[in-house]
Image (spheres, rainbow, N blue to C red):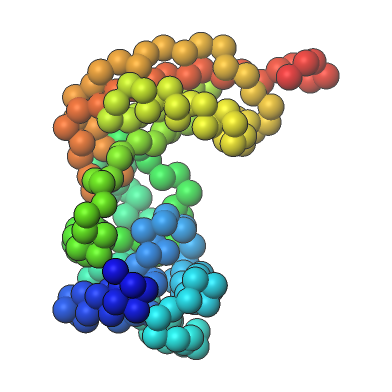
């Protein structure tokens, strides 16, 4: 399928679901877990469209700001409040399943509602028909335990995820400085787990990775 035909199919799908091009750009930024307030989401959406090339052309920032407002009005997105975080804390206490928590969200940030998340996932599946299903994996870092809890759908992905964290410098970033792995346990098979607050995967694996900071002046 040529590029023109792909763009036509993409735009036709958006129109069928009542999504404007600017709204789609906004939803994509939230899907990427860009954790910022509404105006910055609009700015990121415009910047991404300008760089990638929106098939309908360039739009002014005000169109993306209006798209943010419409996404909120349609119930797809919401501005997070202190009450939201209190509810999430209570929900996780009774959930029981291991859950990956995006700790970068703050009050005032823009995020999906449950309905908006489900809608956009359905839209992505239609737009990306024929592609392999999403592979779920992620991690939490517990500073008190100095431990990364890695989760994935298969054991091999847990090990490759650890390698990526080491190579990309994420171990040191989360640990607050140079860090070395001192203990690896697992991966253990687990039952249901949540790669995000909306999604439940029926089974997977859990790898525990404990790190330590070297003493000041000591070797890394």
x and y, in percent, of residue 21 in the image? 34, 79
- Say whether residue 11 is visible: no
Q: Residue at x 56, y 12 (%)?
A: 182
Quarter occupied by the N terminus = bottom left
x and y, in percent, of residue 64 in the image? 43, 81
Asked if residue 160 is positioned above or below residue 199 in the image, the reply reads: above
Q: Residue at x 48, y 19 (%)?
A: 209
Examine the image and state in which quarter residue 4 appears: bottom left
Q: Residue at x 48, y 86 (%)?
A: 58
Q: Is residue 188 left or right of residue 94?
A: right
Quarter occupied by the C terminus = top right
x and y, in percent, of residue 51 in the image? 54, 72
- Direction right: furthest residue: 217
- Say whether residue 137 is visible: yes
Q: Is residue 106 left or right of residue 200?
A: right
Q: Nearer the viewer, residue 132 or 82?
A: 132
């Amino acid at each position: 399928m040529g590029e023109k035909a792909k763009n036509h199919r993409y735009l036709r799908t958006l129109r069928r679901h009542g999504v404007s091009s600017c709204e789609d750009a906004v939803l994509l930024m939230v899907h990427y877990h860009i954790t910022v307030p509404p105006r910055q989401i609009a700015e990121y959406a415009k910047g991404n469209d300008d760089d990638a090339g929106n098939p309908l052309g360039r739009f002014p920032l005000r169109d993306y700001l209006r798209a943010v407002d419409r996404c909120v009005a349609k119930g797809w997105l919401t501005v997070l409040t202190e009450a939201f975080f209190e509810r999430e804390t209570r929900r996780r206490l009774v959930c029981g399943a291991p859950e990956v928590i995006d700790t970068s969200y703050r009050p005032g940030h823009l995020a999906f509602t449950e309905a908006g998340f489900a809608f956009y996932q359905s839209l992505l599946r239609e737009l990306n028909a024929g592609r392999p299903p999403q592979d779920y994996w992620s991690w939490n870092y517990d500073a008190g335990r100095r431990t990364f809890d890695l989760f994935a759908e298969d054991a091999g992905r847990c090990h490759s995820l650890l390698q990526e964290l080491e190579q990309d410098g994420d171990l040191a970033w989360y640990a607050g400085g140079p860090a070395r792995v001192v203990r690896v346990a697992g991966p253990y098979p687990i039952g249901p787990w949540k790669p995000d607050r909306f999604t439940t995967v029926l089974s997977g694996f859990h790898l525990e990775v404990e790190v330590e900071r070297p003493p000041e002046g000591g070797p890394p």
